[in-house]
Image (cartoon, grey):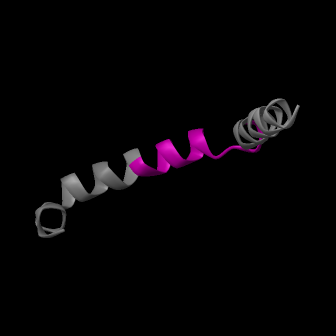
Amino acid sequence: IAWVLEDPDRHQQLCHSARLKVEAKFTLEVQAREYQKLYEEVWQAAK
């Protein structure tokens, strides 16, 4: 944590990168696709 807090530029870059990753991974479309995949796997296993 200190490594990040000691360098404001590093802190800003990590914050920006983390935000982009979350925005890309947790969109409604991505989450719907992941749930659909999970439900299909459960359904196939129950057959």
21 within the magenta span:
yes
Q: Is residue 22 above or below residue 2?
A: above
Taking the image as shown, residue 3 lies to the left or right of residue 47, namely left
State the image coordinates of residue 40 (x, y, percent, origin top left). Answer: 82, 32
Q: Where is residue 1 in the image (x, y as percent from the top left)?
A: 19, 68
| Quarter of the rendering occupied by the C terminus | top right
Q: Is residue 45 left or right of residue 30?
A: right
Which one is nearer the viewer's eye here, 19 or 38? 38
Residue 46, magenta (yes or no): no
Q: In this view, does 25 lie above or below 10?
A: above
11 vs 18, left or right, is left
Work out whether residue 28 or residue 10 is closer to the camera in this orientation and state it: 28
**First to last magenta residue range:** 18-29
Query: Main SS of the magenta segment?
Result: helix
Q: In which quarter of the image is residue 35?
A: top right
Residue 37 position, x and y percent, is 75, 32
**Residue at (58%, 46%) from the top-left corner?**
23
Query: What is the residue that sits farthest to the front in this orientation?
Result: 47
Q: Nearer the viewer, residue 45 or 21?
A: 45
Q: Residue at x 48, y 43 (%)?
A: 21
Q: How many labels does the image show?
A: 0
Residue 30 found in image quarter: top right
Q: Residue at x 38, y 45 (%)?
A: 17
Task: Tell me the quarter of the picture where residue 25 sits.
Answer: top right
27 left or right of 43?
Answer: left
